[in-house]
Image (cartoon, rainbow, N blue to C red):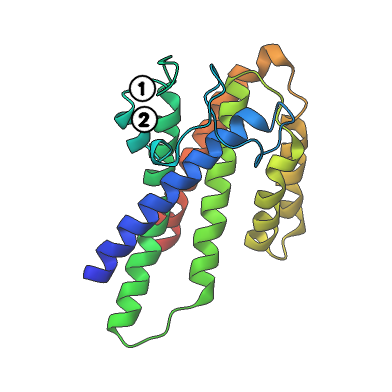
């Protein structure tokens, strides 16, 4: 059981880190900026964020929601997205981890497909979350945001060509939503993200 709890902590921290990266994607990708350069910095004063201030969720709390250098407020959405990333990753991984621990107690070996299923559901969840928040900001979604999710979708649907074509078509349509309608479309996309959190539990049952 100690291993099980350790894995839960790992997946939460991993998911929170993905949420931190998602904040970068949500801001930079629609503005055609590099995701890796420059390093994370305050949008108000431009000063680079120190590594110990960039710890997901905790960094924002340590700084009390303000930039260390210019003392301007940092949006609460940053730690919220990080927290959602952590909790979401934990929820997605939980059924698979429970199944994995059960297999180990029975002396069975784990299947690589378990981890691929975790990665697929996690990718779909994070992509939907990012797409929904980009639309909420009334920005246009770049199609390349969807490429990893489309790859996993093809694997999930396998030989059903009709379903395989559904996601790419929907993704293309989402990239052409007029600015005045984007916030309205953000809500069903964010609801879809919640749906991917429930999918592992449905499959498990």
Q: Pointers 2 and 1 in contact (CB under 8 A)?
A: yes
Residue 65, label in figure: 1
* Mark 2 vs 1, N-terminal side: 2
Q: Is residue 205 visible?
A: no
Residue 186, label in figure: none
Closer to the camera in the image, 163 or 127: 127
Q: How many marks?
A: 2
Q: Quadrant of the N terminus?
A: bottom left
Residue in the picture at 30% in, 85% down: 106
Label 2 CA crowd tier, 10 Å (few <14, some 14–19, many 20+)? many
The Cα–Cα distance between marks 2 and 1, rounded to whole angstroms, is 5 Å
From the viewer's perspective, is residue 94 above or below residue 174? Answer: below
Residue 7, percent across and down?
33, 63
Residue 85, percent across and down?
44, 42
> Quick one: SS at disc 2?
helix
Residue 13, percent across and down?
38, 51
Q: Quadrant of the C terminus?
A: bottom left
Residue in the picture at 55% in, 39% down: 22
Residue 31, percent across and down?
71, 26
> In the figure, is residue 122 to the left or right of 97?
right
Residue in the picture at 57% in, 39% down: 128
> In the figure, is residue 151 to the left or right of 192?
right
> In the figure, is residue 146 to the left or right of 70?
right
> Quick one: SS at disc 1?
loop
Q: Is residue 173 visible?
A: yes
From the viewer's perspective, is residue 164 above or below residue 16? Answer: below
Considering every residue shown, the one lying at the far top of the view is: 180
Q: Quadrant of residue 10?
A: bottom left
Closer to the camera in the image, 62 or 151: 62
Residue bearing the label numbered 2 = 60
Residue in the picture at 32% in, 58% down: 8
Label 1 CA crowd tier, 10 Å (few <14, some 14–19, many 20+)? some
């Amino acid at each position: 059981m100690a291993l099980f709890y350790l894995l839960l902590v790992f997946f939460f921290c991993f998911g929170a880190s993905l949420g931190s990266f998602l904040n970068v994607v949500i801001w930079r990708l629609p503005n055609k900026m590099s995701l890796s350069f420059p390093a994370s910095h305050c949008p108000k004063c431009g000063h680079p964020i120190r590594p110990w201030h960039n710890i997901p969720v905790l960094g924002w709390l340590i700084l009390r929601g303000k930039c260390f250098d210019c003392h301007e407020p940092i949006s609460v959405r940053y730690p919220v997205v990080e927290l959602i990333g952590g909790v979401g990753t934990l929820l997605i991984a939980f059924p698979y981890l429970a199944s994995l621990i059960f297999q180990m107690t029975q002396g069975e070996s784990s299947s690589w497909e378990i981890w691929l299923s975790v990665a697929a559901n996690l990718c779909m969840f994070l992509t939907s979350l990012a797409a929904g928040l980009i639309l909420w900001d009334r920005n246009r979604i770049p199609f390349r945001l969807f490429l990893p999710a489309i790859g996993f979708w093809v694997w999930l649907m396998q030989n059903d060509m009709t379903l395989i074509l559904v996601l790419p078509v929907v993704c293309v349509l989402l990239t052409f939503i007029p600015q005045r309608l984007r916030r309205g479309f953000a809500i069903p996309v964010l609801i879809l993200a919640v749906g991917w959190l429930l999918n592992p539990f449905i499959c498990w049952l």
